[in-house]
Amino acid sequence: MNAVADLRRLVVRDLRRELRIPDSLIVNTALPVIIMVLFVYVFGGAISTGSSGLPYIDFVVPAVLLMSGGYGAALTAVNIADDMTGGMIDRFRTLPISGWVVPAGHVVASMVRNVAACAIALAAALVMGFRPTAAPVEWLLVLALIAGYILAMSSLAVLWGLLVKSTQAAGAFSFVVLFLPYLSDGVVPAETMPAVLRGFAEHQPVTPVVATLRSLLLDQPMGSSGVLAALWLGGALLVSIPVAALLFRRRTSS
C-alpha cells in the first residue's frame, strides 16, 4: 500500500511538472493536430488512399492518433534523463520509497497525459469531418490499443532515457517516434512507395497498429494486423521493462 501511495504521488508530481511548462504542453497537444490539418487540407487532395478507397481524412486519422500519443510518450525519455542527471534521484534515494516507483511514475503519468492528447486529436478530427463507424466494443478496443501503444513507447522511452547521459540525447527519441508513422501505411499507402521503402513500411511495428485502428474505427478488414500489433507491442514491453529496471538499479546503486 505504501508503494501504491508513493506511485500516486510521483504521478501527480510528473503531471504537475507538465502543467508548469505550458509551452511543452501546447506543442505536445497541438503538433499532431497541425500535422493533420496540413495533410488533410494541403496534401490530402493529391494523395490517393489506394485500395482502401477511404477519404483521406479517414485514412490518416489513425496515424495521427499514434503520432499524438507516441510523441508525448517519447518525451518521457527527457523526463527520466532529467531526474537522473539533475540530482532528483539523489533526493529520492534519501526517502523511504521503493526504487521502481520512480520510472513507473513517469510511465503512468505519460499514459494519463497522452491518452488525453489523443482524445483532443480525435475531437479535432471529428470537427474536420472524420466519421468513424465503430461500435461501443470497438471503441473500447481502440482505447486499449492506443493505451498499449503509449505504454510501449513510454517504456522504451524510459529505457532510452536511462541509456543516455543527457537530456539533449534523450530528446532524440521523440523525433524517431514522431516520424516512424510517416514510413508506415499510415500517411500514404505502402503500396505506392518504392520497393525498398515499401518493404520497410510493411514490416515495421507502426503499420499493423495503424491497420488495426483503421479496421476498428472504420469497419475495414483486419486480417492478421491485430495479432501482429499485439505481438509488436507485447514484445516491446517484454524487452523494455526488465532492461529498464536493470539499468535503473545499476545507475542508482552506486
Image: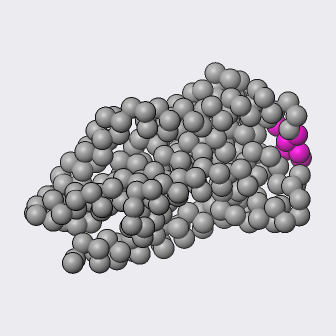
Can you tell which quarter of the image residue 226 is in?
bottom right
Q: Which residue is drawn at 45% across and 65% down?
A: 160
Q: Position of residue 128 (x, y in %)?
A: 68, 23
Q: Nearer the viewer, residue 144 or 157?
A: 157
Q: Nearer the viewer, residue 76 or 220?
A: 76
Q: Residue at x 82, y 37 (%)?
A: 54
Quadrant where the image shows the C terminus: bottom left
- Does residue 181 appear to the left or right of 88 in the view shown? right
Q: Which residue is drawn at 21% across and 48% down?
A: 9
Q: Position of residue 39 (x, y in %)?
A: 74, 34
Q: Nearer the viewer, residue 22 or 133?
A: 22
Can you tell which quarter of the image residue 183 is in?
bottom right
Q: Give the range drawn in magenta.
A: 48-54
Quadrant where the image shows the N terminus: bottom left
Can see residue 145? no
Q: Where is residue 102 in the image (x, y as percent from the top left)?
A: 27, 59
- Does residue 193 appear to the left or right of 22 in the view shown? right
Location of residue 5 with respect to 243 vertically, above or below: above
- Does residue 141 appear to the left or right of 132 in the view shown? left
